[in-house]
């Protein structure tokens, strides 16, 4: 199983964001990718640089104006901002009636929902290559690989059709899923990050070609807040093709694995021909954003159950932050998955 990563993904280096109104050190740091890449190399995974597919596949799931906004957003911001200003939105359009304004501060509020996605000088380069990493993993599977892993960083599953959210800019897993539809007209996107895959849900909520399932604690008490409730099952053509398996804060491996099994059963009932996994390791009990209590053995068991679905599979990295067990949990999942697909 190949892995894909590009060193330009290190270039987004946010320092702080605001959590509960307080400036907080930003947990989505380049060191996450270093740790995961080094684990892959230590376990003899082939790690390759991604191809460049351009912006067209990104625009296939995102508003084209949103995609292009990030190309020069930081330069526009610093041209007007006072020295030392943080590149975060400070104005928002409320219900979003209206249009993108010319003013950079207004434009940032139009395209960015919160303070967790601060712009830096090289943010665009990092998010562009994070998306290309996901596309390259999808392309490898399209060309016949049983599975591939995209070490996408920054992550993507909170990015909505037209707005950044929760550390995420471009929705790498959704981009990969859309790319796979060129070969398989029915596929599933299974999100096992600890947080609701609210961005992916937003993108596919009205569609019937992608079955979306997310495992996460109650969003009312965890910071995606607005999407991810059990009664949200799709709309219009997409009615019945969204599933939210809502866990309780502090749930452990038995509850998580039972929810995973229900999600797998629903994916099989849908008739998915291929699979994208939004892969987070922040279900760990010692993760800095901990909400659940999965240990390394639980991650390995999740991998085995997903592999047993016997579908072409693209694994896209989402969360999992710099806690003590991040490398161990990633190693447990990815080596167990590789072993299972070889068996």
Image (cartoon, helix red, strand yellow):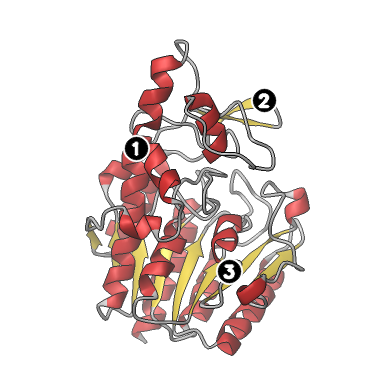
Residue for point 60% across, 71% down? 213
Tell me, yes or no, if residue 34 can be seen here. Answer: no
Instruction: Say which of marks 2 and 3 sits in front.
Output: 2
Tell me, yes or no, if residue 114 can be seen here. Answer: yes
Above or below residue 84? Residue 230 is below
Q: Which mark is residue 190?
A: none
Nearer to us in this view, 119 or 284: 119
Q: Which mark is residue 298?
A: 3
Q: Measured from the top left, where is residue 199 in percent x and y? A: 56, 55
Q: Measured from the top left, where is residue 84 in percent x and y? A: 46, 13
Name the quadrant of the C terminus.
bottom left
**Circle nearer the N terminus (3, 1):** 1
Cα–Cα span, label 2 and label 3:
34 Å
Residue for point 41% across, 81% down? 340
Residue 83 placement: quadrant: top left
Q: Is residue 212 left or right of residue 174?
A: right
Q: Which residue is mark 1?
A: 71
Q: Which mark is residue 22?
A: 2
């Amino acid at each position: 199983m190949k892995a894909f990563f590009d060193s330009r993904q290190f270039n987004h280096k946010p320092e702080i964001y605001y959590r509960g109104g307080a400036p907080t050190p930003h947990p989505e740091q380049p060191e996450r990718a270093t740790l995961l890449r080094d684990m892959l190399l230590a376990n003899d995974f082939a790690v390759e640089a991604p191809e460049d597919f351009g912006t067209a596949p990104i625009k296939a799931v995102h508003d084209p104006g949103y995609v292009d906004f990030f190309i020069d957003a930081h330069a526009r911001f610093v041209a007007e901002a006072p020295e030392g200003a943080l590149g975060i939105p400070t104005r928002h359009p409320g219900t979003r009636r209206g249009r993108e304004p010319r003013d950079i501060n207004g434009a940032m509020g139009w395209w960015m929902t919160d303070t967790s996605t601060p712009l830096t000088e090289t943010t665009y380069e990092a998010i562009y290559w994070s998306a290309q990493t996901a596309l390259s993993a999808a392309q490898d599977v399209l060309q016949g690989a049983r599975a591939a892993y995209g070490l996408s960083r920054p992550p993507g599953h909170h990015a909505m059709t037209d707005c950044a959210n929760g550390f995420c800019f471009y929705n790498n897993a959704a981009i990969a899923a859309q790319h796979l539809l060129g070969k398989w007209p029915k596929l599933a996107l299974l999100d096992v990050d600890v947080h609701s895959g609210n961005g992916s849900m937003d993108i596919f909520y009205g569609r019937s070609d992608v079955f979306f399932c997310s495992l996460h604690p109650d969003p009312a008490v965890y910071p995606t807040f607005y999407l991810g409730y059990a009664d949200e099952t799709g709309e219009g053509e997409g009615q019945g093709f969204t599933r939210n398996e809502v866990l309780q804060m502090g749930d452990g491996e038995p509850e998580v694995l039972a929810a995973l099994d229900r999600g797998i059963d629903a994916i099989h009932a849908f008739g998915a021909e291929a699979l994208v996994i939004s892969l987070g390791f922040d279900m760990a009990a010692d993760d800095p954003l901990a909400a659940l209590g999965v240990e390394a053995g639980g991650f390995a068991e999740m991998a085995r159950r997903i592999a047993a679905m016997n579908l072409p599979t693209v694994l896209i990295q989402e969360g999992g932050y710099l806690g003590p067990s991040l490398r161990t949990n990633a190693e447990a999942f990815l080596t167990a998955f590789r072993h299972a697909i070889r068996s």
